[in-house]
Image (cartoon, rainbow, N blue to C red):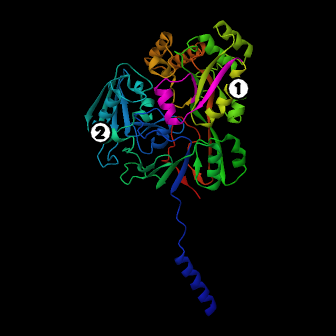
Amino acid sequence: MTKLKRLALAAVAAAALAWPAMAANTSLTMGMVLEPPHLDPTAGAAAAIDEVVYANVFEGLTRIDSTGAVQPALARSWEISEDGKVYTFKLAGGVTFHNGVPMTADHVVFSFERAMAEGSVNAQKQLFAPIETVEAVDPATVRITLKNPFGALLFNLGWGDAVIVEPSSADTNKDQPVGTGPFKLDRWVKGDRVEISAYDGYWGDKPALASATFKFISDPAAAVAAVLAGDVDAFANFPAGEALEQFRADPRFEVTIGSTEGETILAINNQQKPFDDVRVRRALSHAIDRKALIDGAMFGNGTPIGSHFAPHHPAYVDLTNRYPYDKDGARKLLAEAGYPDGFSATLKLPPPSYARRGGELIAAQLAEVGVKLEIIPVEWPQWLEQVFRGDDFDLTIVSHTEPMDIGIYARGTDYYFNYVSDEFNAIIDKLNLTAETEARYALMGDAQRKLADDAVNVFLFQLPKLGVWKAGLEGLWENSPVQANDLTGVRWTQ
């Protein structure tokens, strides 16, 4: 080897030492349309809460995976008594909360009794209604005794509303969440982002990501710009369906279209005139062209529905023809109800594009039958305060993304659309006492038909899950069986 070659090789070797291989990417910025009102999944109904903290910061006894199946979480195993009323859970060992407190069976008892208490602020308190008692058998064993057999218990315990919390942090979880999950909160810059990072003391498999940021971008055009500019790596629920073809044609990105549990409805205040008349509600259902709405607001992405039930569920009943698009039929019903010239009402629209865009189209369609709507855009905290908690609305548009949530219609005037029906409540009561699968499905069908007959709301479409993210990112959910941006299996492959 010549002296010149030896010098050249030495230079290459020195350069290799001076320029180490590029480290693998271990951070992620996820775009979200809505900012959560707070970060405590046991004290709020907003889907955006779980989209940040579910499986990331907080964990329950069970968890729901990307297919909708129940998986072990803080409970590693369980046994069910022959009569179906007693569940005995064995807890994972070595679990600590992010504040360093070791988790025991006492924390499970505290969490569930808190959710079941008379003054509970849990938005899904009915999930715990079948429970008679919760006992700590020993520090690693929990026994739950039910009032009656209840086949959906393990699934319900996988909801974000059933996560396990630590007593000393329970009252501050809204702003400073303390869970047992693989990520802990670093910072919440309100109005902009939430930052989380891997928790060193996590009891389970360590996540590939060292940190993640949830960036809040409600405007569809701004969401497109942020993805194209690389300001966000992924948008698991992309708000700009009109831009999907642009991203499909760009090899830098991956596009997926999946399903959600999001029944999108024109929600009606059933106790407010003129909507307390079923003929008026039926008229609204006849006056709306679902296909035109899906094409115009969702760019063809979405599945029409005729009741509050997901089309991908085996118990789904197709009721979309119960109220076919029929303007003359709508006018006739309004006249029978005493409104031959129509009436005026308000339509409050939260920020998501399906609501804002859909609201404009629905207002135009209803105007053709004499129903004149004043559109009132509201931000998400306003919607929660005025509409969801305050019942201060005539009509609104929202997607209900909780899984299997048809039971919300049994809450009467305690729930914002104020539907009261003894017949429907009897169906749900029977469903809650039924464990056999086919019998449960039959009752679910009865519940769907009753809601359609009463035209409780105008059932529009099942919200699709439009995902756009950078190529080389894997592990994000294509479908949303629960409200989640589960980052526990997310990693970069390039």
Q: Secondary structure at mark 2?
A: helix
Residue 248 image offset from top left, x and y in percent:
70, 48
Q: Residue at x 63, y 19 (%)?
A: 344
| Pointer 1 local density, CA inside 10 Å: few below 14, some 14–19, many at least 20 | some
Dot 2 corresponds to which residue? 167
Q: Which residues are magenta?
A: 369-398
Q: Residue at x 41, y 38 (%)?
A: 40
* Amino acid identity at mark 2: Pro
Q: How many marks?
A: 2
* Amino acid identity at mark 1: Ala
Q: Is residue 71 above or below residue 452?
A: below
Q: Quadrant of residue 146?
A: top left
Residues tagged 1 and 2 counted as in contact (Cβ below 8 A): no
Dot 1 corresponds to which residue? 364
Q: Is residue 237 left or right of residue 421?
A: right
Residue 259 image offset from top left, x and y in percent:
60, 35
Please name which of the two marks, 1 or 2, marks the residue nearer to the observer. Answer: 1
In the rendered image, the residue lying farthest to the left is: 138
